[in-house]
Structures are given as C-alpha cells and as structure tokens.
Amino acid sequence: MRIKELLNELSEKGVKLWADGEQLRIRAPKGVLTAERKEAIAKHKPEILWRLRQNNFDSSIAALPVIVPEPDKRYEPFPLTDIQYAFWVGRMGVLELGDVANHGYYEI
C-alpha cells in the first residue's frame, strides 16, 4: 500500500496521527487499528513523520494571510468593523433610540 493511500484510509477511519519529536503518536477509535494497519504504519513510519512535519509547516504558513504593502494608500481610512459601525450608527439621531453614546460603569 502506498503511503498516500494509507494516510487517506486512516483519515477516513478517524485515525489521528501527529509527530512528537521522533515519535509517531496515534489516536484511533477502538477496533480500527488492525494488525495489518499497524504493520503498514510501522513500515512507513519515517515517511509518515516526514509528511506530518511538512504538512504542519505548510499549513501554518498557508493559514497566514499574505501581506501586500501599498504605501501610496497608507493615509486612506480603514473600513469600520461591525462593532464600530454599530456604535457609529447608535450615536446618530436617525434612529428612535439613537443619539446615545457608549457608556461604561466601574466599581472601585
């Protein structure tokens, strides 16, 4: 069995694999890890560890947004967030219960 097929099969069965240093950690539902699957995992352990490390590295980088500098737009205003927009609309007198500022109360 090829390693990619093995990893796909294990994933479909709910098996979780992760690298802990040089150790391969496995969490699987009861009865899923048959002797044949354990043997295949042991046979491909170095390759599995390498792929897990590569995937963790790639996924952590892919999760970050790409920053594109635009120096000519640095003084343009940013769009309001949802909560900023809600506060801004609440401060206006166009709504029946509007024209009210944000209030806070602290006890010392």
Image (tube, grey):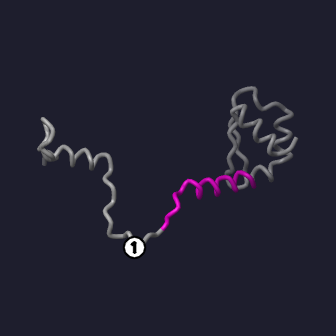
Residue 106, visible in the rendered structure: no
Q: Does residue 71 lie above or below 86 as drawn?
A: below
Please give the range of residues in magenta: 50-68
Q: Position of residue 46 (x, y in %)?
A: 80, 53
Foreground of the two, 57 or 88: 88
Foreground of the two, 26 or 96: 96
> Residue at the spot x=75%, y=55% of the render?
50
- Answer whether residue 6 is magenta in the image: no
Q: SS class of the residue under badge 1?
A: helix
| Residue 54, image quadrant | bottom right
- The quadrant in which the N terminus is found is top right
Q: Position of residue 102 (x, y in %)?
A: 16, 46
Residue 67, visible in the rendered structure: yes
Q: Position of residue 64 (x, y in %)?
A: 53, 57
Residue wearing tag 1? 72
Marks counted in the figure total: 1
On screen, residue 26 versus residue 62, left or right, reads right
| Residue 25, image quadrant | top right
> Residue at the spot x=32%, y=46% of the render?
82
- Mark 1: amino acid: Asp
Q: Main secondary structure of the magenta part?
A: helix
Q: Position of residue 61 (x, y in %)?
A: 59, 58
On screen, residue 50 versus residue 90, left or right, reads right
| Residue 37, image quadrant | top right
